[in-house]
Image (cartoon, rainbow, N blue to C red):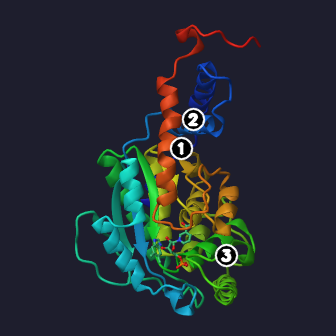
Amino acid sequence: MLAETLAAIRPADPRALAEARAHQDRLTKPRGSLGVLEEVAIRLAGAAGASPPPMPEPAALAIFAADHGVHARGVSPWPQEVTVQMVANFLAGGAVANAFAAQAGVTVTVVDVGVAADLPEAPGLVIRKIAHGTDDLSQGPAMTVDQAVRALEAGIVVARGLIAEGARCLITGDMGIANTTASAALISVFTGKDPADVTGRGTGIDDAMYHGKVDIVRESLRVNGLVGFIDSGSPPSEALRALAAVGGFEHAALAGFILGGAAARVPVILDGVIAGAAALVAAALDPAVTDHCVAGHRSAEPGHAAALTHLGLRPLVDLELRLGEGTGGLLAHPMVCAAVRVMHDVATFDSAGVTEKPV
Ligand SMILES: O=C(O)c1ccc[n+]([C@@H]2O[C@H](COP(=O)([O-])O)[C@@H](O)[C@H]2O)c1
Ligand SMILES: Cc1cc2nc[nH]c2cc1C
């Protein structure tokens, strides 16, 4: 399924890009006056292979939840049980992601890809558990390559299912206590940046815990033979090995979710640092995937900016958020819709009889 998904991904269509650019310039506004929103609309046209691109709604948020063996090393101030407790909160509609999703008119699906506890079946919950949490990435591989591929495929299945139900935009979400440690390790591996430059304070840690966290990220790269950098030019097997070594099940599933959206030409709005790390994995498997992604926001985690720079993506929202769950992606969704709606609704100089500025 992974190979088939990768084979279906196409880069941005140059003709749709050119048409969208020309159309933007015919609309009744000074050229370029919608700034980055013009780029977003053009980007979605390239991704869809059509100008104007289809409206990116309805949108669906998928929150991939999993636990992390590295939690035992004291990298997060929160107990691991908060992962399963927050899954229950999402299903009950009580989390920030639920409030933002309600505001934006977005559906919420929660996917258990590796929570350490067993969850009862519930409406809105998809159970695709690979294992009860990963192994400790600072002692050896967090998961096997086979598990990484199964988690990737779980993400592809969720993307396909949401699209089959009518979603025309996917939004990434995550929940996993300690997952900013795995994110930092992945970002270090895929950008070549030093662990000290891409490790952040996650949910909020003091200086002592922070220094320990940087050391653990560094150790994870050494123990797993990942010092040196994995680029989109490297073979996919290298990217999968790195993902399995230092990733989480939610990172793997998110990479699959992003690939699944791209393969169906449905745009994917990326949330924060966990999504950024997953997008690096997806881009190492197929660089064309980034043409189908919009960076919803820039998180306060330093690794997120590094990931976005490496991917060549510009974040739409920059509000020092560091929550995850998909919250930054949800805030960006109405902006992406507005950018595309301009392409559908706004009159041209010709049709409205407005005088164009002489060139
Ligand atoms: O999205 C982000 O950029 C982000 C930044 C910091 C923390 N988080 C969330 O906080 C949790 C991980 O934080 P930590 O400190 O336990 O590694 C996890 O559930 C993430 O969704 C998310
Ligand atoms: C309460 C809480 C909510 C979260 N949502 C995403 N990560 C989280 C981490 C904590 C600790």
Taking the image as shown, residue 30 lies to the left or right of residue 89, namely right
* Residue 327 shows up from this direction: yes
Q: Is residue 236 above or below residue 339?
A: below
Residue drawn at 67 percent across, 12 percent down = 356
Q: Position of residue 96 (x, y in %)?
A: 42, 64
Q: Is residue 248 above or below residue 190?
A: below
Marks 1/2 in contact by CB < 8 Å: the verdict is: yes
Q: Earlier in the sequence, mark 3 or mark 2?
A: 2
Q: Is residue 282 above or below residue 47?
A: below
Q: Position of residue 101 (x, y in %)?
A: 39, 54
For the residues marked 3 and 2, what is the alpha-carbon distance in whole angstroms?
36 Å
Q: Is residue 97 above or below residue 228?
A: above
Marks 3/2 in contact by CB < 8 Å: the verdict is: no
**Residue holding disc 3:** 199
**The disc labelled 3 sits on which kind of residue?**
Thr
Q: Position of residue 161 (x, y in %)?
A: 32, 54
**The disc labelled 2 sits on which kind of residue?**
Asp
Q: Position of residue 134 (x, y in %)?
A: 47, 83
Quadrant in the rendering for residue 14: top right
Of badges 1 and 3, nearer the viewer stands 3
Quadrant in the rendering for residue 319: bottom right
For the residues marked 1 and 3, what is the alpha-carbon distance in whole angstroms?
33 Å
For label 1, the crowd category at 10 Å Cα-Cα, with few meaning under 14, some 14 to 19 and many 20 or more, is: many
Residue drawn at 53 percent across, 38 percent down = 44
Q: Which mark is residue 338?
A: none
Number of numbered discs on residues: 3
Tag 1, which secondary structure?
Answer: loop
